[in-house]
Image: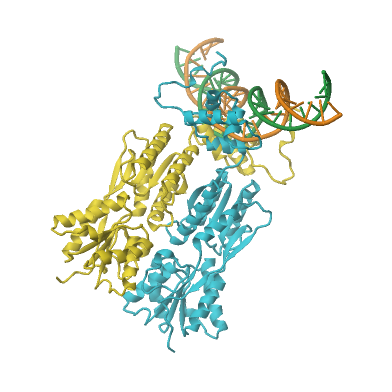
Chain colours: A cyan, B yellow, C orange, D green
Amino acid sequence: MTGTATGRRRSTTKAARARATLSDVAREAGVSLATASRALNGTSGRAVGDGLRERVQAAADRLDYSPDANAQAMARGRTASIGLVVHDIADPYFSSIAAGVTAAADAGGYAVTLANTQHDHVRELHFVQTLQSQRARAIILAGGRQDDDEANDRLRAALRGYREQGGTVAVIGQAILGVSTVRVDNVGGSAALATALHGLGYRRFGVMAGPQRHLTARERTTGFVDALARLGVDVPPAAVVHSEFTRTGGNTALAELLLRAPDVELVFAVNDVMAVGAMSAARDAGIVVPGGLAFAGFDDIATLHDVNPALTTVHLPLEEMGRLATPLALDAAAEPREVVVTGEVRLRDSTPARSA
Amino acid sequence: MTGTATGRRRSTTKAARARATLSDVAREAGVSLATASRALNGTSGRAVGDGLRERVQAAADRLDYSPDANAQAMARGRTASIGLVVHDIADPYFSSIAAGVTAAADAGGYAVTLANTQHDHVRELHFVQTLQSQRARAIILAGGRQDDDEANDRLRAALRGYREQGGTVAVIGQAILGVSTVRVDNVGGSAALATALHGLGYRRFGVMAGPQRHLTARERTTGFVDALARLGVDVPPAAVVHSEFTRTGGNTALAELLLRAPDVELVFAVNDVMAVGAMSAARDAGIVVPGGLAFAGFDDIATLHDVNPALTTVHLPLEEMGRLATPLALDAAAEPREVVVTGEVRLRDSTPARSA
DNA sequence: GTTGGAGGTGAAAACGCTTACCGAGAGGAT
DNA sequence: ATCCTCTCGGTAAGCGTTTTCACCTCCAAC
């Protein structure tokens, strides 16, 4: 009647019911498209009369209307989603951070797109580009950076491109990417741990230093070793072994450590997961823990609270870090900001005081 | 000159460089929009000449073009993202599943949108609607269902709406939602565990049954109890206590269990996390583990492999389950399919053979 | 020397929404 | 009374793609 060909677009037979669009809602409510949009989007700039708003809302409910987020994204020029890039979501370190991010994002009305790099630079870079394609509002890169200039440069370039097009970024880790960062004070944390352990009477230390080029691993190692040096205790290079950041890494590295430095009293693993793996290995080798060999870790992973003996470690508020990173990532400030998170030493049974 | 107001749309000053669009690429390459689109999308229906394709590709590279996923979604009527809904991403059970899903999704070129319900029905429902708004290609609901008809009905209705509009769904848990499911054989797993423990000589069992209305918890409990009944062993109702699915849940529930059934020899907690919490509580109460009280769990969480004594449990291929659920979720088959995952009993030190 | 295809290319119409911009009525100030 | 301003609704122009037609050119076959 009125229109030309808009006739039989929607059939009453619900064979494969097409979704209701905003036009449908507008027609149903007897208002224009614009009014329908304004009525449903709360008071975005303009207000619509109460009567109309209710009428439109009712029509929308009746039609079971759900707005098309993609169309909205396009029309608005921005989305309501945050990209979260982690190294390994199965690692409790990252899953805790993810819990914090999802909580904060949810509270702000954002959806979270999860990308799991599996510790692969190339994949990480690729994900940044994908997120850019999706016009994600912000990206959070969780996890320590590597000492790899080429990879870092490439990543920086990708992030620059993303930011030039209106995206914002935050990193949880090291502040080397030129973006806002939640920085973990790894050096301070492990120094405090070293001091505390020294106070307990330990003098001969071994370190499971994690992956060679991993900055977090490196910071924790040097923080620990340097603090001991200041206390007059030397950690010989032979007593520092590298390995993967995993349980298996700790497990296999223990043998090497004991071979190279048989007289250590305490092993500091730069994360809890490795520490626990190493502790198991020690026990399997017939060593009494902590009597024969003491262990300390870093992170204070919740799932590991019940290992026995309870693990001495540096507590990190992982979920909180995720929560903190979210507003940081969303903030379009010209100058990158930095939030420092300090760990807290938790002395437990795995490092009993040592009667000199 | 030619157009009307298209003049100074793009300024050479790169103050805030606007992103290149496909039109820009087309203009740069000297072809039409249509050709540019076809050239970049591989051979979608139509082929473009090799020369042109290369020219367009070069232009795209030169302009650093990245397609707008939202616009593509709109034009194509579908997206390349999968929604993953979990109860608690910080729980290793779910983070392992998430690892599997991200791996499979990544391999298929899909992005993953993560939603963390924090065990809240309302939030779960809300996320389904959000994902529908985003026109997610598929949704994976991970985690056991509740015995709550109202919530299940609402969820079913939401999923029906989503599927009517072209979405596809899979569940990891119970097959009660009318969609494809990766079903865990909880009954079989705990029955096998019960049988094995009975074989070791245990006769007096306590059960930490988890949340009352949680179907997974319930299946594991009844599977265990029924199997024992078949073996002639009775688990008195008093020896079955409910609690949250967490470490704290196990921790606090132990006292109640010991109060109500002081003579139990072995506590079966329906998941590892609770088992470990309970084990700790027992030790704190001065009980020798496993000598004074033995423990068994369910799931075989990797992070918990190093608790001491090593926990007897039923191994579940969690990551694999996530991987399996992905194609299931993507499949638009009319009939829901069901994949059954069977657990495998792993007897370890927490349940030594009992000399009758 | 026509004619019927292929094989490529382009113009333009969607996709579903937001948001200037415009216009009409209502109410207040002069 | 008249003019101005304010409010609130509608019209229509995008947003960046994909995709349907329509068209053109070049060849092979008759």
Give the camera-side residue of B114 and B243. B243
Q: Quick check: B115 above or below A272? A: above
The percent position of residue A46, horizontal first and vertical second, equals 66, 34
Q: Quadrant of the N terminus of chain A?
A: top right
Residue A305 location (% of width, % of height): 40, 68
A19 horizontally vs B26: left or right: left
Asked if residue C23 lies left or right of residue B256, the reply is: right
Quick one: which residue is furthest to the left in this view? B232
Vertical placement of residue A292 versus A73, above or below: below
Residue B224, position as x, y percentages in the image? 22, 56
Count of labels in the image: 0
Q: Is residue B40 visible?
A: no
Residue B104 image offset from top left, x and y in percent: 40, 48
> Based on the displayed image, in which of its 4 quarters is residue B254 positioned?
bottom left
Q: Is residue B311 above or below residue B217?
A: below
Q: Residue at x 58, y 64 (%)?
A: A183
Q: Residue furthest bottom?
A: A356
Residue B18 is left or right of residue A240, and the answer is right
Residue B221 visible in the displayed image: yes
Q: Image quadrant for the C terminus of chain A?
A: bottom left
Please name the residue shown 53% across and 67% down the image.
A216
Instruction: Tell which of A209 and A110 is nearer to you.
Output: A110
